[in-house]
């Protein structure tokens, strides 16, 4: 539901059903709405049976990469005698994405229940929920909800009388986009700088504190309770196009639309309807120019590509981009593409952890060159230089932050060359003052 | 490095981890298999108590967690939300990343810089009341422009709303 907007008839409201409903924040309110039934059911199942159910549902990670969740959980070793950890990724810092915030603000118990199910399924007694430092309100809501869940026996040493221990610890970030990357997050929880780690070893072998670890996004974990209560077949049936994309997904829409918000849609929903109908379309007299659909880390789509695309993992790839975290940044014809691409490059330059040369230097240099172009001091060779740098930044680093910076630059130059040319030929007045 | 920064600490350091704050930290230890994992929470506690994290406070954190001051400094400097210098009584963070920029965050930032008297980013107003910084995406892009004042999140801020919001922060 596109809170604060009422649900749209074309939405399939599962995760967002109680957004805006303050009573759903409380333990009793959540139970009244069917909450914690899934956790009780899970505790009566074997971990393997839960994992099989998730595999059958087709649920894929909602944090960005879309990795099948059941398969990820099945990588955890069995009977190895080591402590296992679940980490819930609530760092949500990808520009354009603001769905996990609403899940935590409105339905904290939905997330707690999902975390408890996940922890049980992977043999973990502790789940750390890493909440970005700026999310002060979600932090307060989650803190109260976790305390209530302990008091009511949904967490602690004997969850709902099952004899199982499940603890949830909230861990506050402190301002670093890179800590959303899974291994950087583990370092951050361990009290280190948030530098991503070289893989292998993968988290399922040696993750948090060197122990087998699974990490999942807030929305991914929140989906699990619905799958357990309503069944894998129901979830798999929520699919409008490609059977590899199932269930509902929260699509955050922001930028130049009349009704920005989180819309919950069945996978495969037409992007055209999402933008022009649900999100209210452009402001009067404006036309759609471009969309970045996956948060800012994916290629830019032209209006024509966006309007022809179906919103699922495969549908967006087919039209030249990626679903990513499904944060849709919508731009109308008043947008200066060069400026916005520069602003994104600046974001990545600021957030690079600086371990890898290609990323540290590449994000800084691309930002400088784009700045030079915007100052009206660009050179003819600058586009080639940007493409060359972007090439060096792609597929060569410890994590994909570097690739993420290159994606909007390369696609922007390819799809909107005339906007770069206008600055380079001095036909357009500089957007930034010369230095 | 740490030696020279110690020399700059002006006021004598009053320990942070005593009484209630110490209890708060002690309550965290059993939640993690290592003491080091309490580093980010401990730094938050210092900032909450003192408004910023001084070199002497870092040394105290190092001491209670069994780390070295240099290590603590190395970690603290990685994270943008820790204040390593004193800031104004109220700390204002304004989102400036593309999605908010599209929706006019530049005008909001300008209005805030003017109304607070800060003039420029990172500066503290002459009366010591405000410090304003531009930050990257606050995870609330559908509610442009979001700003954080201390621990309060304000959604959908426009230049017109700025004066009314700031009036709540004497
Ligand atoms: C630079 C970078 C930032 C990321 N930020 C986030 C984030 O804020 N939230 C998130 O859930 N995943 C983020 N991810 C993806 C995580 O590394 C990881 O794939 C995800 O949390 C796995 O959960 P899932 O399988 O449930 O999607 C980021 C990845 C990279 C490379
Ligand atoms: S790609 Fe960038 S952010 Fe990722 S590890 Fe390398 S330097 Fe750090
Ligand atoms: S870009 Fe401003 S909150 Fe995301």
Image: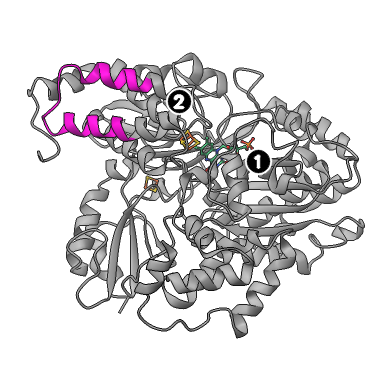
Regarding residue A258, the answer to whether it shows in the image is no
Depth order, front residue of A254/A48: A48
Type of secondary structure dominating the magenta stretch: helix
Query: What residue would you read off at disc 1?
Result: A216
**Residue at 77% across, 69% down:** A151
**Residue at 67% across, 30% down:** A200
- Give the answer, above or below, for where A230 lies relative to B127: above
Same chain for the residues under marks 2 and 1 in the image: yes
Q: Secondary structure at mark 1?
A: strand
- Left or right of A351 on screen, residue B66: right
Query: What residue would you read off at disc 2?
Result: A271
Disc 2: host chain? A
Q: Which residues are magenta?
A: A364-390
Chain-order first, disc 2 or disc 1: 1
The image position of residue A105, as x and y in percent, is 55, 57
> Label 2: how many residues lie within 10 Å, few (<14), some (14-19) or many (20+)?
many
């Amino acid at each position: 539901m596109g809170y604060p907007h009422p649900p749209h008839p074309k939405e399939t409201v599962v995760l967002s059903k109680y957004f805006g409903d303050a009573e759903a924040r409380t333990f009793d309110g959540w139970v009244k709405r069917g909450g914690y039934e899934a956790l009780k059911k899970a505790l009566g199942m074997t971990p393997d049976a839960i994992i099989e159910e998730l595999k059958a549902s087709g649920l894929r990670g909602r944090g960005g990469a879309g990795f099948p969740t059941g398969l990820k959980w099945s990588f955890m070793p069995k009977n190895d005698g080591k402590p296992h950890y679940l980490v819930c990724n609530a760092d949500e810092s990808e520009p354009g994405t603001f769905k996990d915030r609403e899940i935590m603000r409105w339905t904290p118990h939905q997330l707690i229940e999902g975390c408890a199910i996940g922890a049980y399924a992977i043999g973990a007694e502790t789940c750390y929920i890493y909440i970005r430092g700026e999310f002060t309100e979600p932090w307060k809501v989650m803190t109260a909800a976790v305390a209530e869940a302990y008091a009511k026996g949904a967490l602690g040493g004997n969850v709902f009388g099952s004899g199982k221990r499940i603890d949830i610890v909230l861990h506050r970030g402190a301002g670093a986009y890179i800590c959303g990357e899974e291994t950087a997050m583990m370092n951050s929880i361990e009290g280190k700088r948030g530098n991503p780690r070289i893989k292998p070893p993968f988290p399922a072998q040696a993750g948090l504190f060197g122990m087998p670890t699974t990490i999942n996004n807030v929305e991914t974990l929140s989906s699990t309770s619905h799958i357990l209560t309503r069944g894998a077949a129901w979830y798999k049936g929520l699919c409008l196009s490609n059977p590899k994309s199932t269930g509902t997904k929260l699509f955050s829409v922001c930028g130049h639309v009349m009704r920005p918000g989180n819309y919950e849609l069945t996978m495969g929903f037409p992007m055209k309807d999402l933008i022009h109908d649900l999100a209210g379309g452009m402001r009067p007299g404006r036309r759609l120019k471009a969309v970045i659909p996956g948060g800012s880390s994916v290629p830019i789509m032209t209006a024509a590509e966006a309007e022809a695309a179906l919103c699922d993992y495969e549908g967006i790839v087919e039209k030249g981009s990626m679903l990513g975290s499904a944060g849709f940044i919508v731009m109308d014809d008043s947008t200066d593409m060069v400026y916005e691409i520069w602003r994104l490059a600046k974001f990545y330059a600021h957030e690079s952890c600086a371990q890898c040369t290609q990323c540290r230097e590449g994000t800084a240099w691309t930002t400088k060159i784009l700045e030079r172009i915007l100052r009206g001091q660009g050179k003819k060779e600058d586009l080639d230089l940007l493409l060359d740098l972007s090439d060096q930044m792609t597929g060569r680093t410890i994590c994909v932050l570097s690739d993420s910076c290159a994606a909007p630059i390369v696609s922007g130059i390819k799809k909107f060359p005339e906007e770069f040319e206008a600055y380079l030929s001095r036909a357009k007045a500089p957007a930034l003052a010369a230095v | 490095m740490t030696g020279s920064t110690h020399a700059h600490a002006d006021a004598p350091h009053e320990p942070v981890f005593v009484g209630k704050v110490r209890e708060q930290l002690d309550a965290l230890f059993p939640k993690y298999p290592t003491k080091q994992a309490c580093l980010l929470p401990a730094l938050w506690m210092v900032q909450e108590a003192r408004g910023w994290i001084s070199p002497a406070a870092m040394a105290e954190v190092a001491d209670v967690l069994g780390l070295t001051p240099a290590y603590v400094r190395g970690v603290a400097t990685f994270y943008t939300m820790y204040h390593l210098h004193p800031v104004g009584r109220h700390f204002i963070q304004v989102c400036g990343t593309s999605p908010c920029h599209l929706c006019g965050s530049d005008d909001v930032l300008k209005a805030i810089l003017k109304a607070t008297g800060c003039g420029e980013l990172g500066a503290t107003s002459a009366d010591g009341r405000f410090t304003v910084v531009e930050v990257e995406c606050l995870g609330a892009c559908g509610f442009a422009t979001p700003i954080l004042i201390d621990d309060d999140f304000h959604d959908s801020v426009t230049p017109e709303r700025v004066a009314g919001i700031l009036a709540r922060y004497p």
